Amino acid sequence: MSIDIDTARRVAHLARIAVDEADLPALAQQLSGILTFMEQLNEVDVEGVEPMTSVTPMRLKRREDVVTDGGMAEKILSNAPDAREGFFAVPKVVE
Amino acid sequence: MSDLTKLTLAGARDALRAGETTSVALTEACLSEIEGAGALNAFVHRTPELALEQAKAADARIAAGDAPAMCGLPLGIKDLFCTRGVASQAASHILNGFRPEYESTVTQNLWDAGAVMLGKLNMDEFAMGSSNETSVYGNAVNPWKVDDRALTPGGSSGGSAAAVAADLCLAATGTDTGGSIRQPAAFTGIVGLKPTYGRCSRWGVVAFASSLDQAGPMTKTVQDAAIMLGAMAGHDPKDSTSAELPVPDFEAALSGDIRGKTIGIPREYRMEGMPAEIEKLWHQGAEMLRDAGAKIVDISLPHTKYALPAYYVIAPAEASSNLARYDGVRYGHRAKLGQGDGIVEMYEKTRAEGFGPEVQRRVMIGTYVLSAGFYDAYYNRARKVRALIKRDFDEVFAAGVDAILTPATPSAAFGLGEMQDADPVQMYLNDVFTVTVNLAGLPGISVPAGLDGQGLPLGLQLIGRPWEEGDLLNTAQVLERAAGFVSKPAKWW
């Protein structure tokens, strides 16, 4: 399976990474190389094998659905590139 | 005492308790070594004031007779760990300026045990790399040198490895997703332990691939790894995959007796084109364990060949999801926007500017293998192959094998920049002996075992049964003593 330029453009957009048109051919080639390496997995007989969900046989723990923390808006916003009046600020979103 | 920074954790601990030195003296000695080691580019954020404050507090505790396990011992911390109020940016431009308001559980455990933080250590960006060449801080450099070339300390925990090997700190934290503790440890002649998945909390450690990531110690000796793992480990309700198991006294498990143990030698690790000296070292390691009374058996781990391709589906898939949080909204870098740019342009420009090329590549590969139409063909298939890789190990352990001996790396340290024009897959091959251990969630340790023909360190890896780090460390110490590796890099920095 090789990745063409259109697929590379689509993947970059899905990943929300801007890639210049001029860089797409090289990117497509690199991604194809990595995918070719992964194709080896097709040699393995995986009939009847369950995909692994947890490497150690454990059940994820549950806890009471209660508030355990909070009241620290200032701390949460302290690293924001743009925060105003207790909120994260982003460019206007119009759908 | 002279040469304070050359002490092991155990040696410094005993000297502190005997009143032969102080934590302040140890810490000042390390800070001065760090000051003079700019050429290694290992420490990227220094915290001398915090270090001296912690050292004074440690000295007071020692004087009061209340000294916990790591009291007064100065450490370096990989930049991947969030440390309160101290820059923590996973060696990425996208986390520029990030100062967490919280402390990772592992580092908090170390401070609770009395340890002292000297600063943050260089690494590959988001722990994605095997040579420390993808860091926003620039390359970390291996203190070992054989000619004019600057060599890689390995990756991703390259700064940690360089700092410990060069005696800038007594020990350091690392993290290991596919070999990121064990490969740099082998390249620099130190000990690196990846614990069983779930032994150390992942809370507050910047996530790369959550089902594979584990923190562990990088130290000068196996005994030190036992001491430091004891302080780092433990159940944490804030990490749902952290195991609710008691932490045994790993140091007490170092009996030096491995008589009757069974050590497996997996035939699939005998790779085509493997350098003869690595093959020889591996053989010598097996002989050493046999001489110590262990039984050496040939074993088979038939799916070994598929570990790397499975890893390079699973790890990027998880990374693409974990790294979605870097969007220029909550922390770190945000791109300057043009007229009319909306939120999608903000995300796309921020991530293009903030992530380096290797991280971008892995995020995109991960996005692709998780996208509609390819999820079953790549991601689900890789998870099935992962189950088979784990089954291989389960069967070998069920047949009575106590530990598995392999080479740690397919070569000694290579020159920085030498792989620049290589295919990304060539770099991935560095992890060929280590990555299976992450996929199966097992503990693995790299022990320095000898020098190659050029005079560079080589390591051997021991793989243990899940949750039996104590037993693994004991076997590793027997190997360490038999190998008698005492070489140190000559100081040029």
Image (cartoon, helix red, strand yellow):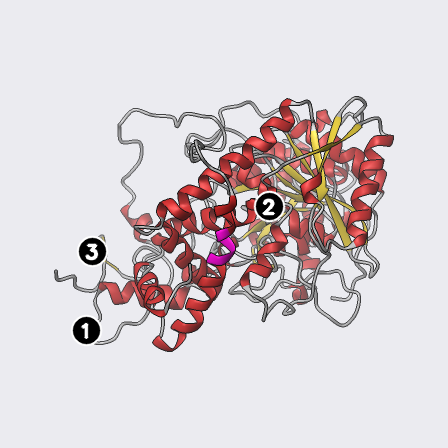
Residue at mark 3 shares a chain with residue at mark 2:
no
Judge the density around disc 1: few (<14), some (14-19), many (≥20) Cα neighbours within 10 Å.
few
Numbered range of the magenta stretch: A35-39
Residue B466: image quadrant is top right
Residue B206 visible within the image: no
Q: Are marks 1 and 3 in contact (CB under 8 Å)?
A: no
Question: Is B249 part of what is drawn in magenta?
Answer: no
Query: Which residue is identified by label 2?
Result: B305
Element carrying mark 2: helix
Residue B373 visible within the image: yes
- Report the residue at 71% width, 25% height from top: B253
Q: CA distance from mark 3 to mark 2?
A: 55 Å
Q: Nearer the viewer, residue B231 or B307?
A: B307
The kind of residue on which mark 1 rests is Gly
Judge the density around disc 2: few (<14), some (14-19), many (≥20) Cα neighbours within 10 Å.
some
- Report the residue at 46% width, 49% height from top: B313
Q: Nearer the viewer, residue B28 or B344?
A: B344
Majority secondary structure of magenta residues:
helix
Element carrying mark 3: loop
Residue A85's tag is 3
Q: Position of residue B137 (x, y in %)?
A: 54, 65
> Which chain is disc 2 placed on?
B
Q: CA distance from mark 2 to mark 1?
A: 50 Å
Q: CA distance from mark 1 to mark 3?
A: 24 Å
Question: Is A36 part of what is drawn in magenta?
Answer: yes
The kind of residue on which mark 2 rests is Lys
**Would residue B267 be found to the left or right of residue B424 on screen?**
right
Residue B340's tag is 1
Does residue B66 lie above or below A83 as drawn?
above
The C terminus of chain B sits in image quarter: bottom right
Residue B191: image quadrant is top right
> Which chain is disc 1 placed on?
B
